Amino acid sequence: MDSSTSAGESSTARIVARSSMMESIRACGLSGLSGVRIDKDELRRRLLIPQYIRLAMLDSIKKKDVDGGDMHFRLRGSDDIPCPESPLVVFINPRSGGRYGPVLKERLQQLISEEQVFDLQDVKPHEFVRYGLACLEKWANSGDLCAKETRENIRVVVAGGDGTVGWVLGCLGELHQKGREPVPPVAVIPLGTGNDLSRNFGWGGSFPFSWKSAIKRTLHRATTGPICRLDSWHLVLQMPGLEVVDPPHSLKASEECSIDQTLEIEGEVPDKVNCYEGVFYNYFSIGMDAQVAYGFHHLRNEKPYLAQGPISNKIIYSGYSCTQGWFLTPCINDPSLRGLKNILRIHIKRVNCSEWEQVPVPKSVRAIVALNLHSYGSGRNPWGNLKPEYLEKRGFVEAHADDGLLEIFGLKQGWHASFVMVELISAKHIAQASSIRLEIRGGEWKDVFMQMDGEPWKQPMSKEYSTFVEIKRVPFQSVMVSGE
């Protein structure tokens, strides 16, 4: 009797584990490959860049010199070296994915080669672009056939969260600016908390570490998946003689402010202004959601032992949001919890329109989001799947990641945001825009919280002078690999 019960429980446990693993596989967008056998040696043959090229690129990066790897090309030996069909490099953020990051790095190095897997703590993506790829281009132009084919066909895999993916995309954008095409397409191994970029392009919201073949199948899909386009958005922040407190790495100080001067500024202009600029791919937000994200990030940095993986991060994030007062805003007199209407003016340019138009800020809104993708807050779609009649009535068009438009919506108190996130209701629709101008003035507010693609910061405010945020589409699109 006991033996039979034990066997039954064991069988049930195996079924539950198998079910959990299959759900993880589907979440990663790899279910279409679950019945396809990927041969390890054949995959390695297709991905492996010849050793002399790998070492030359790595030496150029380490020495920060395009000529740093020349020795390997001179000593390459035979000219009859097979070129890879699908050359691939991987950037991995070992701090993402909880305890799995270092394990994944080791598996990838064993499967491809150590020189083709870059730890972002050691090799930054701009170094790869400026020195590694430049070395490859130099020798391709000098007649090395294998270097030429590798440069033309190379793809990039990013193992990390949305911030890591955006970092790599931004650095690859330098190739567009300098006419160094083709730009390598980017695939994703999702290791972050939200993974909205990954979800939007079919790579799922989590990586199935328990599935032994997942890495092979992901790399196979990264080399065979179709190419997609993604809008990116340039943000300029101008403030009166203050400093941004703890800016994210995606926000850099700039000597010149390139905000549009055709729009009249109310009030006086300060003698000195400070400017920052950056690029985002998914969303920019201002208000309570950014405040919660800011507090969570600081909590995680102070107590890294709490960040053991995406699930624990989400639990902590949810609990932390309840402590910030967002759910009690109608009952609280704290100025930082009042509606953004008190401090904010919004101007937009609509599609195919060159004139700025002011749009009203809804009275009850505590957070405003400008969204580029269909995925926000771990796969939610707060803009909603709108009916054609409603789109026509509001003058909207169907939203896409490459349509040159941002969807602007508002979130009220925490209860409203919660219902939006479980998709029981849509967010407060404000506008669709090809450009956005926000003017913020403090009053009783000492600071306001902002974030780009999940990277938050605390923005100081002034009572006398306005702070401006201007968002415009980058003239070129990023290149992604679809995981679907």
Image: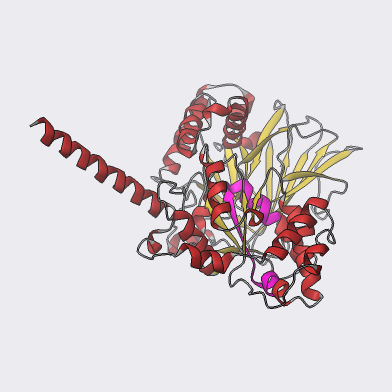
Q: Is any atom of residue 356 visible in this view?
A: no
What are the residue bounds of the magenta stretch? 149-170
Q: Nearer the viewer, residue 447 or 35?
A: 35
In the image, residue 155 above or below residue 273: below
Q: Residue at x 57, y 36 (%)?
A: 289
The correct choice, above or below, for 441 with respect to 14 in the image is: above
Most foreground residue, 45 or 244: 45
Query: Residue 137, position in %: x, y?
Result: 77, 69
The reply to whether residue 46 is in sight is yes
Q: Is residue 183 left or right of residue 34?
A: right
- Pick the front one: 213 or 358: 213
Residue closer to the observer: 69 or 75 = 75
Q: Label the magenta part by its dominant secondary structure.
A: helix
Q: How is the image coloured?
A: secondary structure
Q: Along the horizontal axis of the image, is 389 left or right of 458? A: left
State the image coordinates of residue 171 (x, y, percent, origin top left).
72, 55
Query: In screen coordinates, is 87 left or right of 476?
Result: left
Task: Tell me the quarter of the image containing the N terminus.
Answer: top left
Residue visible at 54% across and 27% down in the picture: 305
Residue sitting at the far left: 1
**Residue 158 shown in magenta:** yes
Report which quarter residue 8 is drawn in: top left
Residue 279 left/right relative to 21: right
Give how far across and how far down residue 250 sits, in percent. 71, 45
Q: Quadrant of residue 183?
A: bottom right
Instruction: Confirm whether the magenta stretch covers residue 141.
Output: no
Residue at 52% x, 69% y is 224
